[in-house]
Image: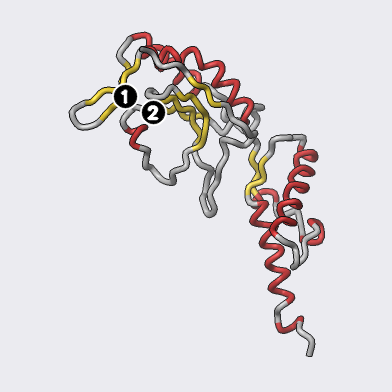
Amino acid sequence: MSIRLNVLRCTAPDALFRRYPHASAPQPAYIELGLEDGVFLASYDPLVGPGRPVEVASGIDRRWAIPALKGEAANELLGELAPFAQRVLDGAAVEWDGENYVGRLITDDADEAYGLITVRCEAIDATEHSQDVLPVWDMDSIGSPWSADDAGITAASSDDDLDAIETRLLREFREEQEQPDAVVHGLSAHLRWLRDELGDASHSPSRRMP
């Protein structure tokens, strides 16, 4: 009996973006189809380095690399590819190979549909000029435009205060750039650094009363 496709939609514009602290690049994004459960989704790889989950290595979960699309663009792609994904499921099986359970495509139609998904994903425009790709800015490239005074940060600013300031600055930046889904990587860390610098300065010997 064929498994019914279950499309899980992205719920945030930046759902496919994640860059870990001290990482030189964002995590790779992908579309994934589970041959056992029929789940069809877009996400980012949570693992750092070349390792893969056993379900992916065994072919039970099939992945296609894509750029870090905006959430809505990823949802549109999932919808476009859903008929092909169902064809893959209709001709797939999870079987015991003597050592492990592995996912296999056992019909020509499943192979063809798999290939069509591959071609479509490889054809996605990954340049920064694509309207579907999430615009990601880095604090290093922006040049730290916000000082503590500009942001309204003091040494006494709480984490909740900084979260509110980050939301406001990000909104203003998006309006200025005319990019409503833009991500500014490192903004949160920058605001906390500004607060910590103010705190360190207030406790330095030169600032103490004689």
Task: Give whichever of discs 1 and 2 has the lower sequence position.
Answer: 2
Q: Which residue was labeled with disc 1? A: 103
- Closest to the observer: 135 or 188? 188
**Tag 2's secondary structure?**
strand
The residue shown at (35%, 33%) is: 55
User: Position of 194 compared to 30: left or right?
Assistant: right
Tell how many labels: 2
Tag 1: amino acid: Gly
Q: Position of residue 131 (x, y in %)?
A: 66, 27
Tag 2: amino acid: Asp
Label 1 close to label 2 by CB (< 8 Å): yes
Q: Quadrant of the N terminus?
A: top left
User: Position of 100 compared to 108: left or right?
Assistant: left
- Closest to the observer: 182 or 144? 182
Please rate how many residues cluster around mark 2, counting C-alpha atoms within 10 Å: few if below 14, some from 14 to 19, many from 20.
many
Q: State whether residue 133 is above or below residue 157.
A: above
The residue shown at (42%, 12%) is: 87
User: Position of 87 compared to 131: left or right?
Assistant: left
Q: Which residue was labeled with disc 2? A: 61
Residue farthest top in this picture: 109
